[in-house]
């Protein structure tokens, strides 16, 4: 089964001046990232403002991405939702359009037991072919629900197509616990300060929003770590961490979109209620990133 590996980008969702999904800008974004060497794309995640999209918009973004990429890199669609029914529907859609796999964050807003989380994931699994790759996604700082290693271990043992997890926690020990859930279980990091260390302990790479702004840097970092060139990997990790800090680690998606436009791909603004960045301040931040000479 296909697995995520390397630098996989959770792409932003471009909007036009009317606030509609801008499919032409989406295509340009995909081309820009693939041309700069990223190893995979991950539409409709946190960075893609998925919770502010309708299910039909999410399907549109998924379809356009899969069709335009045309197999050049793997495309895994994020289908997680507050509603199990929506997540199941989006999962079936991803299979139908030929996506390489899916990922799903936990439900959010309501605090759920581990038993409820297991049922949520089992219901998504139930609509997938038995050999269709499925990544769990843990980001409790946003969802309020933490998928414990015991829960991940149960799902990994019961369902062979639960091939891995994207873990956005800053805890490298948690990543290690997930790696131990099953032989060959895939862990993709969601914290860009841990890429070199994570690859060293056996993680498969990172799902990196910051890589949209400096794909060259993050690809070099992963390649160095994967090759065991630790001196170079640690030097590049310091640069990547600095870039992530300047970009507020994804905490300001309007800044992300400004930064991507700075790299030559206009992707519009964020959708309300997200706040728009002060362009004067954003320009200062990008000037600092430019000075790092990372692209």
Image (tube, helix red, strand yellow):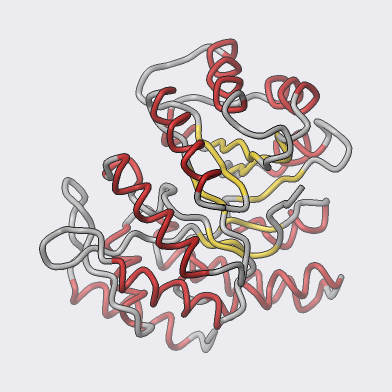
Q: Nearer the viewer, residue 52 or 70?
A: 70
Give residue 233's position: percent from left, percent from top: 74, 73
Residue farthest to the front, as pictured: 96
Residue found at x 75% / y 55%: 204
Left or right of residue 195, residue 10 in this image: left
Q: Is residue 210 left or right of residue 251?
A: right
Relative to 95, 212 lies left or right: left
With respect to residue 283, does 230 lie above or below? above
Query: Would you identify the image quadrant in which residue 281 lies?
Result: bottom left
Q: How many marks?
A: 0
The relative height of residue 139 versus residue 98 in the rendered view (above or below) is above
Image coordinates of residue 194 in percent, x first then y, are 66, 56
62 or 222: nearer the eye? 62
Which residue is rendered at x = 85% and y = 43% of the image?
Answer: 184
Instruction: Determine the residue positioned at 61% across, 47% down.
Output: 101
Q: Quadrant of residue 127?
A: top right
Above or below, 145 relative to 161: above
Q: Is residue 251 left or right of residue 128?
A: left
Residue 21 image position (x, y, % from top left)? 25, 59
Query: Which residue is nearer to you in this view: 71 or 79?
Result: 71
Position of residue 259 measured from the top left corner of the image (x, y, whole percent): 34, 74
């Amino acid at each position: 089964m296909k697995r995520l590996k390397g630098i996989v980008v959770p792409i932003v969702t471009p909007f036009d001046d009317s606030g509609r999904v801008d499919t032409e800008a989406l295509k340009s974004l995909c081309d820009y990232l693939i041309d700069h060497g990223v190893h995979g794309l991950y539409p409709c995640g946190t960075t893609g403002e998925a919770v502010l999209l309708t299910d039909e918009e999410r399907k549109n973004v998924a379809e356009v991405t899969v069709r335009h990429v045309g197999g050049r890199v793997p495309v895994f669609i994020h289908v997680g939702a507050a509603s199990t029914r929506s997540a199941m529907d989006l999962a079936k859609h991803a299979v139908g359009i030929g996506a390489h796999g899916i990922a799903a964050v936990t439900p959010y807003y309501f605090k759920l037991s581990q038993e409820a989380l297991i049922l949520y994931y089992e219901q998504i699994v139930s609509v997938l072919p038995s050999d269709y790759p499925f990544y769990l996604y843990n980001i409790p700082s946003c969802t309020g629900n933490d998928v414990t290693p015991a829960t991940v271990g149960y799902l990994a043992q019961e369902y062979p197509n639960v091939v891995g997890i994207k873990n956005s926690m800053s805890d490298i020990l948690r990543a290690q616990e997930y790696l131990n859930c099953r032989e060959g279980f895939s862990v993709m990091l969601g914290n860009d300060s841990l890429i070199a260390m994570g690859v060293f302990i056996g993680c498969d790479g990172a799902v990196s929003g910051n890589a949209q702004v400096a794909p060259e840097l993050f690809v070099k970092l992963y390649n160095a770590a994967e090759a065991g060139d630790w001196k170079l990997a640690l030097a590049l990790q310091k640069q990547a961490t600095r870039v992530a800090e300047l970009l507020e680690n994804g905490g300001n998606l309007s800044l992300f979109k400004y930064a991507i436009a700075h790299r030559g791909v206009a992707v519009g603004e964020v959708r309300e209620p997200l706040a728009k960045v002060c362009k004067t301040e954003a320009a200062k931040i990008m000037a600092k990133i430019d000075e790092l000479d990372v692209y």
